[in-house]
């Protein structure tokens, strides 16, 4: 189950936007859910919603309504009609706990083979009230966890499992302040977190401490004790306490291998078995750490592994070794991962469509069009006859033809280009009158864009770590290199000019999508931990920790 909430702001919300979302929710859907509405027709729904929203107190960047999506995977146990009936009950339960006094319109979409999902439009205020109705992050998380618990308890036949309402172990990985700042800046897992993931896998697939030592020694790690503390020594000679990595208890829970078992295991094990174990570990690592479909296949390729999707077989090119998903016991994990990728790609596509609809509807000049694209995290480029849009928030790219927006976007470009001087007029001005002002303006614009892109690569001073700040100050005093300082000043000036221009043009900023991205990453992390919990549950008693 995935629950996504997307707030919509005053600046980008008008009758056309509300009507468009109503049409989208109720498309090909005669059984949509209305809550606290009097009317049932399309015009009545739009009018009631706008009348209630008009009561909201005006506030800059204030929420106008919420567009939320609730998605569940299709069940193999019950027919589709029964799934839809139970899903509708879940939506009613969600509305009762999330927004019982607000206006709510919800519609089921079933075009995907892997999932069913509802789109909900929720008013930002209770019916006939001026004050905004708001759930903080903790309260909203509790609503989501409560819905998942309700689903698993009342309707286990839907086969949703535990993703949002996860359980964490008592031991936790301890990161220093410097490591936390580095992770926040680079958006990547630290070396300590990567080591934690590797050792967790090694512990999980080890029946005893001897087997665990065998696993880690193959990759250049050793284990030693200093007093009562067990430490892992990496290839560079750096020591890491298992307690700091949050793995001391898991290691101590491993049993000691008997001498007979060890000798018996040594005679049976062959180099091919060891290679197969590393092969399996790389596959599981890719499943556990991949954040997207592209990242998943990139990790497999870096380990020289090819995945045949039809036969669900992993092939190690160098060793010419094959392992099927059934042999690895990861069929359920692969299915959940594929379902998650499909759902997130669908949500990302819908997010891009909504942003492009807003940009197309609100652009009235080339400068405004460029600013709106920037504000919504979109980048446009032309590939032959196709227009491509890149969504910086979700790191995805689509062609406007696939989104069904190519016609409306080309019409917008024709409208915006109508006021520009033609190429023939520019050539006449240059050859007959010596007027190169248009060419010079284009050159200045290109140089300014190149300078802006170069300056954008410079991190803000507040994002630098303490050591980076010291290094930059030393570079300024010793080498006289003030390029980064000057770039930050230019970035600040550009932001001030942009805000002033938007104020004059009555353009507000687009909604902040950082919370949505954080939710996606948290949901993906939940998927990984759920898979790990399932593997621990399936392990035999003599191998459990």
Image (cartoon, helix red, strand yellow):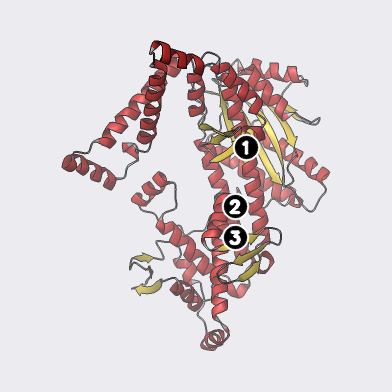
Give the residue at mark 3: 533
Q: Nearer the viewer, residue 140 or 237?
A: 237
Asked if residue 480 can be seen in this view, the reply is yes
Q: Is residue 90 above or below residue 259?
A: above
Q: Position of residue 531 (x, y in %)?
A: 61, 58
Q: Secondary structure at mark 2?
A: helix
Q: Which residue lies at the image location 68% right of the left edge and 33% below the top edge?
A: 119
Q: Nearer the viewer, residue 410 or 94?
A: 410
Mark 2 burial class by Cα count in 10 Å: few <14, some 14-19, many 20+: many
Badge 2 or badge 1: first in the primary sequence: 1
| Residue plotted at (49% across, 73% down) | 215
Q: CA distance from mark 2 to mark 1?
A: 21 Å
The reply to whether residue 167 is visible in this rendering is: no
Q: Earlier in the sequence, mark 3 or mark 2?
A: 2
User: Which callout, 3 or 1, points at the residue further toward the start of the chain?
Assistant: 1
Q: CA distance from mark 3 to mark 2?
A: 10 Å
Picture quadrant of residue 223: bottom left
How packed mark 3 is, by other alpha carbons closer than 10 Å (few <14, some 14-19, many 20 or more), is some
Residue 541 in percent (x, y) is at 62, 73
The mark closer to the camera, 3 or 1, is 1
Horizontal and vertical percent position of residue 289: 53, 55
Outermost residue to the front? 432
Task: Find residue 68 and report its horizontal and vertical position in percent.
Answer: 63, 34
Please indicate whether residue 98 sits to the left or right of residue 298 in the image. right
- Asked if the residue at tag 1 contacts the one at tag 2, i.e. Cβ–Cβ closer than 8 Å, the answer is no
* Between 448 and 2, the one nearer to me in the picture: 448
Label 1: few (<14), some (14–19) or many (≥20) C-alpha neighbours in 10 Å: some
User: Tag 1's secondary structure?
Assistant: helix
| Label 3 SS | helix
Q: Which residue is disc 2 drawn over?
A: 527
Q: Which residue is mark 1?
A: 349
């Amino acid at each position: 189950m995935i629950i996504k909430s997307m707030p919509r702001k005053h600046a980008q919300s008008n009758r056309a936007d509300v009507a468009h979302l109503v049409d989208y929710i109720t498309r090909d859907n005669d059984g949509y859910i209305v809550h606290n509405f009097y009317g049932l027709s399309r015009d009545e729904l739009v009018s009631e919603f706008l009348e209630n929203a008009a009561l909201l107190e005006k506030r800059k960047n204030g929420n106008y309504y919420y567009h939320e999506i609730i998605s569940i995977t299709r069940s193999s146990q019950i027919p589709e009609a029964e799934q839809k009936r139970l899903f509708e009950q879940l939506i009613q339960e969600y509305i009762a706990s999330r927004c019982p006094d607000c206006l709510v319109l919800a519609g089921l979409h079933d075009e995907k083979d892997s999932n069913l999902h509802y789109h909900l439009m929720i008013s930002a205020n209770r019916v006939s009230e001026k004050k905004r109705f708001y759930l903080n992050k903790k309260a909203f998380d509790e609503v989501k966890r409560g819905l998942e618990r309700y689903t698993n308890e009342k309707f286990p036949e839907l086969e949703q499992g535990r993703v949002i309402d996860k359980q964490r172990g008592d031991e936790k990985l301890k990161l220093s302040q410097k490591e936390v700042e580095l992770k926040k800046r680079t958006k990547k897992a630290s070396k300590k977190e990567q080591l934690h993931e590797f050792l967790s896998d090694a512990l999980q697939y080890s029946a005893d401490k001897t087997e665990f030592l065998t696993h880690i020694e193959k990759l250049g790690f050793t284990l030693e004790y200093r007093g009562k503390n067990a430490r892992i020594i990496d290839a560079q000679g750096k020591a890491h306490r298992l307690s700091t990595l949050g793995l001391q208890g898991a290691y101590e829970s491993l049993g000691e291998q008997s001498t007979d078992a060890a000798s018996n295991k040594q005679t049976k094990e062959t180099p091919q078995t060891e290679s197969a174990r590393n092969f399996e570990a790389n596959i599981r690592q890719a499943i556990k750490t991949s954040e997207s479909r592209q990242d998943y296949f990139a990790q497999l390729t870096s380990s020289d592994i090819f995945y045949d999707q039809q036969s669900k077989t992993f092939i190690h090119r160098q060793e010419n070794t094959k392992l099927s998903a059934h042999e690895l016991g990861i069929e359920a994990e692969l299915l959940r991962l594929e379902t998650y990728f499909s759902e997130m790609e669908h949500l990302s596509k819908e997010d891009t469509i909504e942003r492009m609809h807003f940009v197309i509807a609100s652009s009235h000049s080339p400068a405004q069009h460029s600013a709106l694209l920037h504000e919504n995290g979109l980048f446009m480029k032309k590939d032959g006859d196709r227009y491509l849009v890149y969504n910086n928030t979700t790191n995805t790219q689509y062609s406007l033809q696939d989104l069904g927006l190519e016609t409306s976007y080309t019409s917008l470009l024709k409208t915006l280009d109508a006021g520009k001087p033609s190429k023939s007029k520019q050539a006449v001005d240059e050859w007959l009158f010596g007027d190169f002002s248009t060419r010079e303006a284009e050159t200045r614009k290109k140089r300014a864009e190149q300078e802006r892109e170069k300056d954008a690569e410079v991190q803000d001073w507040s994002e630098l770590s303490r050591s980076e700040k010291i290094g930059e100050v030393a570079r300024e005093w010793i080498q006289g290199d003030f390029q980064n300082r000057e770039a930050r000043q230019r970035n600040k000036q550009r932001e001030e000019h942009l805000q002033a221009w938007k104020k004059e043009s009555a353009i507000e900023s687009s909604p902040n999508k950082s919370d949505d991205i954080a939710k996606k990453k948290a949901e993906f992390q939940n998927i990984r931990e759920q898979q790990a919990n399932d593997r621990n549950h399936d392990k035999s008693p003599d191998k459990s920790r």
